[in-house]
Amino acid sequence: MGWYNDPYGENSVRYNLLLPRRVPFLYPKVIGTIEFTPFDPAHSYSSVEGPNRSSLSSYADIAAFQARTWEIDKLCIRRSYQRSGYFQGFFHIFYDHAMRYSPKFYVALIEKKLYRMLRMLGLAVEQRGQAFAGPNTSLVPVVFDVESIMNQPERVQTYLQMNRA
């Protein structure tokens, strides 16, 4: 059995989601990852744009704010920690990235189940284009209007204060 190391963009920003430490002297355990890359539809490493992917750059709002649009890639949480309340830790990562880089939009291809969960949470996430069917799941091309969320401080605080399991 092997695995493929997905290439990283040179100017990507990577985060690890850490399991909260119960014992102070132990190293924290990485239970999830996320990568943000400045959106460049012409770049060969784009995970959302290109042949057999989406064409998010064809939307006027994305094209107008391409310099402030970031791709989300490698968003994952270990299977044994899924559905256990740890996903909310990603809200702190999104917040940190948004505060440092002031994105207007995030674009991504995400699993259909995750897309539905984000919609139920009331996040400003919108499907753009048809989902791509895979052998085990469907990937939905989405746009997160990060700026609209960040302009609502009460809402941001609600997401940041969500409890973990």
Image (cartoon, rainbow, N blue to C red):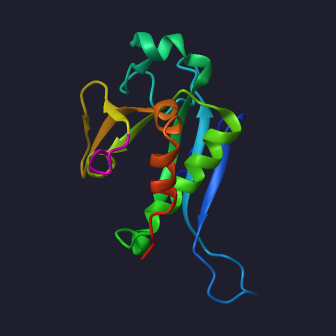
**How far from the left and from the top, in percent, is residue 123?**
37, 43
What is the span of residues highlighted in magenta in the rendered image? 119-123
Residue 102 visible in the current orientation: yes
Relative to 59, does residue 9 appear above or below in the rendering? Answer: below
Residue at screen point 67% across, 76% down: 28
In which quadrant of the rendered image does the C terminus lie? Answer: bottom left
Taking 139 as reference, is 77 left or right? right
Rendered image quadrant of residue 127? top left
Name the one closer to the observer, 59 or 54: 59
Residue at screen point 59% across, 30% down: 103
Rendered image quadrant of residue 82? bottom left
**How far from the left and from the top, in percent, is residue 78?**
46, 67
Name the one closer to the observer, 165 or 134: 165
Relative to 82, does residue 39 appear above or below in the rendering? Answer: above
Q: Residue furthest right?
A: 25
**Residue 91 is one of the magenta-drawn residues:** no
**How far from the left and from the top, in percent, is residue 113?**
26, 51
**How far from the left and from the top, in percent, is residue 126?**
32, 32
Residue 7 visible in the current orientation: no
Residue at screen point 53% across, 44% down: 153
Relative to 107, does residue 117 appear above or below in the rendering? Answer: below
Taking 88 as reference, is 8 left or right? right
Judged by its main secondary structure, the magenta piece is loop
How many marks the image carries: the answer is 0
Name the one closer to the observer, 30 or 61: 61
Taking 21 as reference, is 117 left or right? left
**Residue 122 is one of the magenta-drawn residues:** yes
